[in-house]
Amino acid sequence: MIEVPENFRGAFTLDLDRALRDIAGVAVSSKLNYFTDRAAISACFNRVPSVFSIPSTDFTTTSPEIGVFTSPSLIRSAHFDLSESRDPTGVVVAHMAGVKRVPGGIVPIIRVDGVLQVHPPRGGEIQQANLLGITRTILARRVALRFVSTDGFQSVYLRQQVAGLRDHTGWPVLAGERSTDIRPDLYVILKLLAYHEALEIPHHPALLRELLALEITHTANTTTTRRRYKIDHPPGGGGSKDCADALACAVANLVLRRETWVQHGITRPVLPIEFAALTDALARSGPPGEAPAHDDEDGGTPRALPPPPRETYFSRNPGAPLP
């Protein structure tokens, strides 16, 4: 039995396996389940309805209808985790529904509007024009869709098309690249929200399976003395994490942007200190389209939280009206 000092309790709550290895010096397996509190993840589901009429589609035999968005003036984020003819494409649309005060700080309440798993049609490929159609339909519903991100897989066309779109107020849609393969620490945000009961997801069995199956693998960094890690689905070709990655990136687009906090009256968010490992995600994960500050994927060590990211839409557009 290990007695955990109070100032390290947050690190053990957030990532027990890493804390045992890095703080307590206890040897653990190099491959572990990422979400150790499975009940907390499961409790996030079935809390809100989905705007998508079906959980999955191939746009050939089935095609989803997009329903009504609640509070359409609240800033939305969408992420497309792209694929072509083998794995599904994950699509997630989400918004910050409010904020929640917890001991030591504030966490955002993230409400997922919809999750869609897009399968390649039999003998064919996923057409990015269908994904662009989802974006256009959302904007046509007078929804404040401000951020659209994709992973790096053949995504230039989609980002270029989205970058030319504007919402009904004339506000441009910011499009860029975001990937959990480059920034696996974005999954820390999902842990923070799930453990504080601040993540609301519609019914989607495939996404739940993906999240519960995620593994974290620690490997030696050949270029530095620090360790690297990767969050992935189990090996063997029996699963994917496209919807899980889409969720992590769509949520990050909201949490790491100051204007989403400002919309809820928070100009300087203070996250709970027990989740100080989120420091690196806040400090190094820029808005869509911006590269991280450096390529250290160790995930960082708990320390004081930095101020919010300096680079925001408002800093690039002085005097711009609030969304």
Image (cartoon, grey):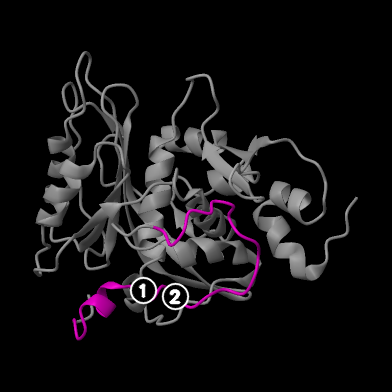
Q: CA distance from mark 1 to mark 2?
A: 7 Å
Q: Residue, x 37% and y 82% (percent of image)?
A: 265
Q: Residue, x 78% and y 57% (percent of image)?
A: 23
**Residue identifier under label 2:** 308
Q: Residues within 10 Å of mark 1 (few under 14, many from 20)?
A: many
Q: Tag 1's secondary structure?
A: helix
**Residue identifier under label 1:** 258
Q: Say whether disc 1 or disc 2 marks the residue closer to the N-terminus.
A: 1
Image coordinates for residue 319, horizontal then vertical, percent: 19, 86
Q: Residue, x 51% and y 32% (percent of image)?
A: 233
- Please report contact status of discs 1 and 2: CB closer than 8 Å, yes or no: yes
The answer to whether residue 197 is left or right of residue 315 is right
Image coordinates for residue 21, horizontal then vertical, percent: 76, 48
Answer above or below: position of 246 versus 293. Answer: above
Query: Chief secondary structure of the magenta span?
Result: loop
Is residue 322 visible in the rendered image? The answer is: yes
The answer to whether residue 194 is left or right of residue 253 is right
What kind of residue is marked 2? Pro
Answer above or below: position of 33 versus 60. Answer: below
Image coordinates for residue 264, horizontal then vertical, percent: 36, 76
- Which portion, as a residue range, is magenta? 292-320
